[in-house]
């Protein structure tokens, strides 16, 4: 393990350079071209078996150990977001309106650096390591499900992945057994009333007034219909009825998100929303259209593998604390891998010391790059310890 840490230390500067390069040339989900090319080239130079265009734009590289053994998969995503960067450093995004505002540039750089270090140790390795570089994590249906269908998990015994987390302190590893990240779903509601003159509401079915009631009624779903011991969020995030000041709106569109951890609560809320929409519209003699679109399932970590991460993380030189985290309401398509094989997804603290961190997806989002080394150390330790253990 000392050897791994030395190799990673030697490769750290290159990790930072790769991260900064990717940061300057971010690519949107499902539109990645140069990023997967860079990744594939890097692995090819190391002599790894490389598959490109996996499930669309994903890259899978395999490092075979000198001795037989199990296969560990390590995953990093590489897509960016439609955000105009407001940071001021020299390596800020050169692409208008596109930014690595979630740290996926760092995930990729850390995994490439780790691949190089592990490659130097391959002769002694008892088993194989599969590097899953995934496109399109940010937009459902996401890249994971297509990569799995295209065989990225074939022969894989266990999978580990991490997310750099800017609002957690540098050096901290956060883990949780069971449901760690939520299922992020979307709903779209159209209230179809009957428009008319603002002076004669009695001749209309005022869709804005109905929407007002609906918003209030929907607050009852989580507070009155879901057990206090279960977690759920129903947020209406947009409402639209653009009209002149003297015309009553014919229709109103509302969209929002639902976050849950349990499949039965997810199914229940999907139905509850429709019941409330139907009832509210019926009371006003209006029509409606309702759509519930499922995002990723909840990310549910396996017990043994999560405890394993918590245990081995202690030994990584740059890790200063290992903590059990509360479940997160954000979503992650790492969920799909965990439905297929055993594994764990954890957070690597990436906050910049002495500074307040901007949240993920913020135009001023930034990470402390030393977290790349921490992430690589923990993933590398997990891979090697797992091969040794089995
Ligand atoms: Zn994100
Ligand atoms: Zn992310």
Image (tube, grey):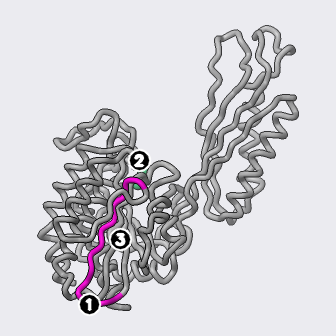
Residue denoted by label 3: 74
| Upstream in sequence: badge 2 or badge 1 | 2
| Upstream in sequence: badge 2 or badge 3 | 2
Check whether the beta carbons of the residues at disc 2 and disc 3 lie within 8 A of each other.
Answer: no
Over which residues does the magenta segment extend?
Answer: 56-69
How crowded is the residue under tag 3: few (<14 C-alpha within 10 Å), some, or many (20+)?
A: many
Q: Position of residue 286 (x, y in %)?
A: 83, 29
Residue denoted by label 1: 67
Which mark, by number, is residue 300?
A: none
Q: Residue placed at 65% from the left, 39% from the top?
A: 188
Residue denoted by label 2: 30
Check whether the beta carbons of the residues at disc 3 and disc 1 lie within 8 A of each other.
Answer: no
| Upstream in sequence: badge 3 or badge 1 | 1
Q: Residue placed at 73% from the left, 62% from the top?
A: 227
Q: Position of residue 372 (x, y in %)?
A: 25, 63
Asked if residue 194 shows in the view, the reply is yes
100 with respect to 251 (left or right): left
Position of the C terminus by quadrant: bottom left
Distance between mark 3 and mark 1 Cα atoms = 19 Å
51 with respect to 339 (left or right): left
Q: Residue placed at 54% from the left, 56% from the top?
A: 329
Residue at disc 2, secondary structure: loop
Pick the residue in front: 62 or 232.
Answer: 62
Q: Position of residue 312 (x, y in %)?
A: 34, 82
Of badges 3 and 1, nearer the viewer stands 1
Classify residue 248 by image quadrant: top right
Position of the N terminus by quadrant: bottom left
Residue at disc 3, secondary structure: strand
């Amino acid at each position: 393990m000392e050897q791994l840490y030395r190799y990673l230390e030697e490769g750290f500067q290159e990790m930072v350079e790769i991260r900064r390069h990717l940061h300057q040339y971010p690519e949107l989900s499902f539109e990645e071209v140069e990023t997967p090319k860079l990744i594939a080239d890097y692995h090819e130079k190391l002599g790894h078996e490389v598959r490109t265009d996996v499930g669309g734009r994903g890259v899978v590289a395999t490092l075979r150990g000198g001795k037989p053994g199990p296969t560990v998969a390590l995953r990093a995503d590489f897509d960016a977001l439609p955000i105009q960067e407001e940071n001021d450093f020299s390596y800020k995004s050169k692409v208008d309106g596109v930014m690595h505002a979630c740290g996926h540039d760092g995930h990729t750089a850390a995994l490439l650096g780790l691949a190089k270090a592990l490659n130097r140790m391959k002769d002694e390795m008892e088993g194989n390591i599969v590097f899953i570089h995934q496109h399109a994590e940010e937009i459902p249906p996401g890249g994971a499900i297509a990569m799995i269908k295209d065989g990225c998990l074939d022969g894989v015994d266990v999978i580990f992945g991490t997310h750099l987390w800017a609002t957690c302190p540098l050096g901290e590893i956060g883990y949780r057994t069971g449901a760690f990240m939520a299922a992020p779903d979307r709903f779209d509601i159209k209230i179809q009333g009957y428009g008319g003159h603002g002076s004669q509401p009695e001749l209309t079915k005022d869709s804005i007034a109905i929407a007002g009631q609906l918003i209030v009624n929907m607050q009852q779903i989580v507070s009155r219909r879901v057990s206090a011991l279960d977690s759920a969020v129903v947020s209406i995030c947009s409402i639209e009825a653009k009209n002149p000041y003297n015309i009553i709106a014919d229709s109103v569109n509302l969209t929002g998100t639902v976050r849950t951890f349990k499949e039965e609560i997810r199914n229940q809320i999907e139905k509850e929303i429709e019941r409330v929409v139907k009832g509210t519209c019926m009371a006003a003699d209006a029509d409606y259209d309702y759509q519930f679109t499922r995002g990723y399932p909840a990310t549910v970590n396996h017990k043994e593998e999560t405890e394993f991460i918590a245990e081995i993380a202690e030994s990584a030189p740059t890790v200063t604390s290992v903590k059990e985290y509360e479940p997160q309401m954000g979503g992650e398509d790492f969920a799909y891998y965990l439905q297929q094989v055993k594994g764990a997804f954890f957070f690597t603290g990436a906050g910049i010391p002495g500074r307040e961190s901007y949240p993920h997806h913020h135009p001023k989002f930034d990470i402390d790059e030393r977290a790349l080394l921490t992430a690589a150390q923990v993933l590398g330790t997990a891979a090697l310890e797992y091969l040794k253990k089995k």
